[in-house]
Amino acid sequence: MGKKYISNWHDLTISFFQSEIEAFIEYEEYIESNFKRKLDYFDKEYKKVSEELKEAFIDHYMDDIILYRDEFPSILRESLLMSIYSFFENKLTELCDQEKMKEFAGSYIKKASTYIKREMKIDFPDEGKEWIYINNINEIRNCLVHYGGETSRIDNKEELKKLHNAISKVDHVSIGRSPDKRIKLEEGVCKDLLTAIESIITQTYKNMTK
């Protein structure tokens, strides 16, 4: 009876967690589609004007085009990626004794994974591609948080090497050529992160019933 109750509780927990993941996905798709819709509008309007007015059209709308093509998507993706990562940290650490978890070494999510394995005796999926991906995202996130995404501000060569290595292994992330060599997040990176998180957390919840 107790085992069945635990199983049902975890089924509900997984269902609620997956609805949270879906909310993130729908939000990302909604905002990205709005950017595309605005850019499509500029493109259609540009095609309507005569050849002699095209240059004037570009001069008039270029600032707006840059906002919807570059600036707004960058702000969205960076803030959303950090929100999603924090969501993942919270989902992991809410399973742990916060004080006991601090005794373990490593990043916040590493401490949590170690606690789950050692103290809770639960099989934690930290050897697959999803866990590797999330740790690479963590390196990128740290640069966004501490350096505003400007890799040129990183003086520590080892830290910079780890960051470049992480970026090379993550799709939809690159480094710009501008003087600040800023990290550029492209459409798809947040969705990939959500997919990895969903796999890790869902498997952890399922392993708790074993």
Image (spheres, rainbow, N blue to C red):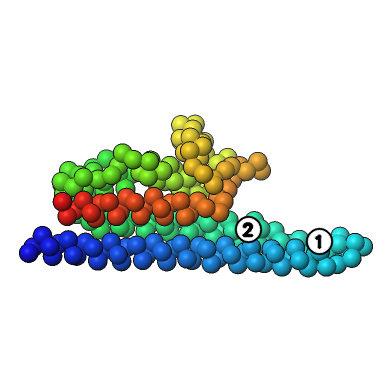
- Residue 176: x, y in percent? 62, 43
Q: Amino acid at mark 2?
A: Glu
Which element type, helix, strand or loop, lies under badge 2? helix
Rate crowding at label 1 as few (under 14), some (14 to 19) or many (20 or more) other CA atoms within 10 Å: some
Q: Nearer the viewer, residue 145 or 66?
A: 66
Taking the spot 37% from the left edge, 52% from the top edge, the residue there is 197
Taking the spot 38% from the left edge, 41% from the top edge, the residue there is 129
Residue 94 figure quarter: bottom left
Q: How far apart are the alpha carbons under marks 1 and 2?
A: 17 Å
Q: Nearer the viewer, mark 1 or mark 2?
A: 1
Q: Nearer the viewer, residue 55 or 156?
A: 55
Q: Would residue 165 appear left or right of 54 to someone viewing this image?
A: left
Taking the spot 71% from the left edge, 61% from the top edge, the residue there is 65
Which element type, helix, strand or loop, lies under badge 1? helix
The quadrant in which the N terminus is found is bottom left
Taking the spot 15% from the left edge, 62% from the top edge, the residue there is 6
- Residue 40: x, y in percent? 70, 64
Q: Which residue is mark 1?
A: 58
* Residue 145 image label: none
Q: Would residue 41 appear left or right of 202 to someone viewing this image?
A: right
Q: Which residue is mark 2?
A: 71
- Rendered position, 13 above or below 89: below
Q: Name the N-terminal-most of marks 1 and 2.
A: 1
Residue 158 in sight here: yes
Residue 22 figure quarter: bottom left
